[in-house]
Image: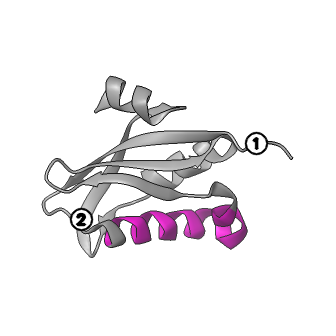
Amino acid sequence: MKRVKRRYLALQLDSDEAPSQKELMDTIWNAVVKLYGEVGASQTNLSLIAYDAEKKLAVIRTTHVTVNLVRASLASVTSVAGKLAALHVLGISGTIKALRKKFL
């Protein structure tokens, strides 16, 4: 069996209010499903690794094959929890340690 390669994305939330973890992940999942359907969303293996509501920073994990799909989906986000918002990708890395060192 082949090992799944993962990529970690550092995200900056541009919004007046910080949403909860659940609201943020629901928004990201809905954006992926809207663009690529349920099959495409299931291939991403998205998960929230870390979220800092005060700094409005988040780290999500996905497979290396679907990084571009996730980035395109994040660009389509215009609101989180009913409030205007945008998600910006600060950087991508293969390890959480390198991601935090470079971008957070």
The quadrant in which residue 34 appears is bottom right
92 sits to left or right of 45: left
Which amino acid type corresponds to the residue marked 1 in the rendered image? Answer: Arg
Q: Nearer the viewer, residue 18 or 71?
A: 18
Queried whether the magenta region covers residue 38, the answer comes back as yes
- Residue for point 44% across, 36% down: 96
- Residue for point 34% across, 65% down: 24
Mark 2 vs mark 1: in front: 1
Which amino acid type corresponds to the residue marked 2 in the rendered image? Answer: Leu
Magenta extent: 23-42
Task: Return the mark for residue 82.
Answer: none
Q: Position of residue 104 (x, y in %)?
A: 28, 33
- Residue for point 45% across, 41% down: 9
84 sits to left or right of 41: left
Label 2 Cα neighbours within 10 Å, binned few <14 / some 14-19 / many ≥20: few
Task: Return the mark for residue 84.
Answer: 2
> What colour scheme was applied to this rendering of the protein?
one colour
Image position of 91 with respect to 73: above or below: above
Image position of 40 with respect to 52: above or below: below
